[in-house]
Amino acid sequence: MVEMHEKSDVQLLRDYAEDGHEAAFRELVTRHADFVFTAALRQVNSPDLAGDIAQGVFTDLARKARPLAEQMPGSLAGWLHRSTRYAALNHLRDTRRRLANERQAMEQLLINSESAPDWERIRPVLDEALDSLGDEDREALLLRYFKNQDFRAVGLALGISDDTAQKRVSRAVERLREFFSKRNVTIGASGLVVLISANAIQAAPVGLAATISAAAILAGTAVHTSTIIAATKAIAMTTLQKTLITATVAVLAGAGIYEARQAAQLRDQVQTLQQAQAPLAEQIQQLQSKLNDTTDRMVGLKEELASAKKNTAELLKLRGEVGRLKAEAESEEARYAGYIVRDINMIRNYFEQNPKTKTPELQFLFKDEWVRVAASSRIGVYGVDQDKACRHDASELRSLADRVAGDMFLNALAQYKENNNGQFPADLGQLKSYLKRSENRPDSQLPIEDIDALLGRWEIVPADQVRGMIAGGDMVITQKAAVDDLFDNSVVVGKGLVFRPFVEMDTFDMLAPVRNAYKAARGTLPSDLADLQPYATTPEQKAAVDRIIQSKRWDWPTTAQQ
């Protein structure tokens, strides 16, 4: 061991590349693990992701050991830092792209439950948006969705064909959507059509038509009174004999008294009407500029709509029309969101039907991680075994949860060593008081449920019992066994955290001669273990390689399906 510490990075790398000396590579990992992990953590700000990137960098180092050993002057620090930087940038780029796709899927997934808030954002500016349209587009849109006419009726009203009417309406809807988008109201064309159809026309308040009619009649009465006054003055201006002056004065006085009384009554009526209209004043003020020339028409339409709402058969017809519009307007994004919901429900059902596959660590996953697994699921794909697809997705979720638990063990182990002079615990029960949820996750403040069952799935073993992975240190923490030995990942916690499929660990020793044969023929180790197949000679070796291939290519169609 002393000799290993004295060797340079390139000497250790050359020992591993030329002789397959695993102890030399283990020394390299131990020497630089903290350096690579810290460099990754600075860039991705997540211990989980930093561990993944660090493992990928050292895996790349092992694959490129021979050319690097010939090119490097003495230290690997520069190469490791540059590789970590590239890996982190690639991960951040992929993560941004994935999050954008998942966010879009989630927005489409929730669109049905948010229609009311969308309408409240659209309603105040809907008429402004309509006014921004050209006359032809606005007329077509009003006839289609505000008067509820089909495209044939719209075409007849505008003197155009059915197809032209449909294109004109579609163009108007798209321009409305662009108008709202500029005002930070984001909604698809199909969602906009559904909102307008459901909310475009509402029944007028009871009595509004009578109030408007009374006001119009009152205005007519005032005009008639003015005419009487003018006539009276004309009569008074005729040449009468002096003997009738007294009678004329009496008549005029009586007419003035009568007119004053009538005016007072009219003022009382106006005041009563104004008081009745007070609750509607704000609404009338908002609509007055747009509706002055169409008041009678709108009143008639509202009365017709109120009558239609009272008619059960007509209401059912309208609902059927709205349902048809929703079905026609279904978009690719909405279907994609539906697939995600379907896949999540199928995975949950799989856990319920197979309770032994459900582990305590699943409590640490949150919604986005379920969506991420469902988004890449093979459930529903033609030619893929659906039971195996659910089994694979369940394993993906368990592996994610086990890595979160591994990070919790790593933090608890560090605190225990700090309080116990660097000693490794003899029993996992000694870590129980140190075990807490990861601080960088949304559920960091919640208690851990069923902690005894969780601890029962893990154990402390010597590091050399773990085949094919190097976590650092003499003792490590890992799962006792796989729930699904074909798909699950083994998580190992020592000085760092590493993980690898159980199927590769179980076959590690069995395939050692096969790897050596591959290396002798190719001069390097394989990047894909499936490439070992031509070099397997015994039935056991061939079965081991076939098992690895099955774990990676389980969703390939069978010969019959091809």
Image: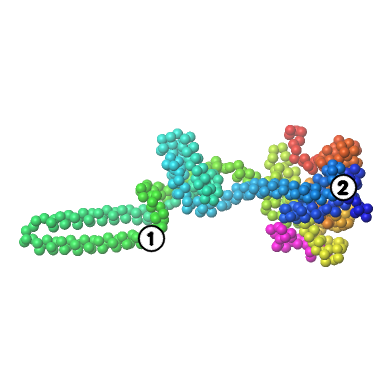
Compared to residue 379, the image places residue 441 above or below, namely below
Q: CA distance from mark 1 to mark 2?
A: 90 Å
In front: 26, or 262? 26
Q: Residue at x 42, y 48 (%)?
A: 305
- Count neighbours of disc 2 (C-alpha within 10 A) and say few if under 14, some if 14 to 19, many if 20 or more: many
Q: Which contiguous range is marked in magenta?
A: 430-451
SS assignment at label 2: helix
Q: Tell me the amino acid under the disc marked 2.
A: Val
SS at circle 1 = helix
- Which residue is the site of mark 1? 278
| Relative side of 523 to 155, left or right | right
- Can residue 492 be seen by looking at this rendering? no
Whether 46 is among the magenta residues is no
In the displayed structure, does residue 279 sit left or right of residue 319? left
How many marks can you see? 2
x%, y% of residue 462?
A: 89, 55
